[in-house]
Amino acid sequence: MLIAKDVMTSPVIAVGPDSTVDEVADILLPHGISALPVIDRGALLGIVSEGDLIRRVEIGTAPQGRSWWLRFFANNADLAEGYVKSHSAHVTDVMTMQVATVVESTPVVEIATLLEHNRIKRVPVLRDRQVVGIVSRANLVRALVVARKGWRAPVSHDDSSIRLEILDALRSESWRPRPEVRT
């Protein structure tokens, strides 16, 4: 069974709480990554992703003024937060602070479920509350490629041997047909 430590990227490229949006963009693009943990003395403060940077005043994608009736029902704190996020140059103002995390021993099946259910693309890996790696969807795809290329089915020479191999494989599956497949 694969665990986070087996597939994670380490060491992690990260930024500190004093970093700027410009510094984040200057790191994301040349490294071909889509997010950076924000770390202070090894402790995770948040994560800043491309998604946190797409609604910006500089490129004309900041949230536009809402109609009067939407403003009437909107929470002023949410409107102010959106304004700060789209206008601030400081990473701590644009980062996502609620970050799902895992530990090195977390099975990849749990990581895949976490990514899927939370609709996120990556998860930091912690050891003693310190960031030691990151597992992204790309890491899971890479693990799939390695597993598929590394796995080679034994070569069978006759139909009977192939049938027995298939039946053995089916018996180990939790979804196998009931009653038990006969040989």
Image (spheres, helix red, strand yellow):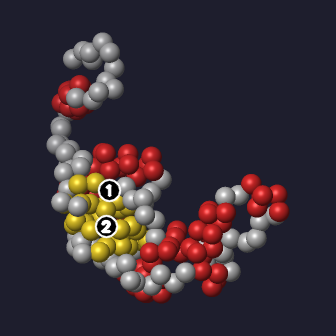
Counting from the top left corner in percent of width and height, residue 52 is at 52, 70
Q: Name the quarter where the N terminus is drawn.
A: top left
Tag 2: residue type?
Answer: Leu
Counting from the top left corner in percent of width and height, residue 22 is at 48, 87
**Farthest residue, direction right:** 68
Observer-nearest of 93 and 151: 93
Q: Residues within 10 Å of mark 2 (few under 14, many from 20)?
A: many
Q: Name the quarter where the C terminus is drawn.
A: top left
- For the image, the number of numbered tags is 2
Q: Earlier in the sequence, mark 2 or mark 1?
A: 2
Tag 1: residue type?
Answer: Thr
Residue 170 is left or right of residue 90, and the answer is left
Residue 54 in view: no
Observer-nearest of 93 and 126: 93
Instruction: Tell me: residue 102, above or below residue 179.
Output: below
Q: Quadrant of residue 45?
A: bottom left
Residue depicted at 63% across the width and 69% down the height: 80
- Of the numbered discs in the image, which one, if any, rests on residue 101? 1
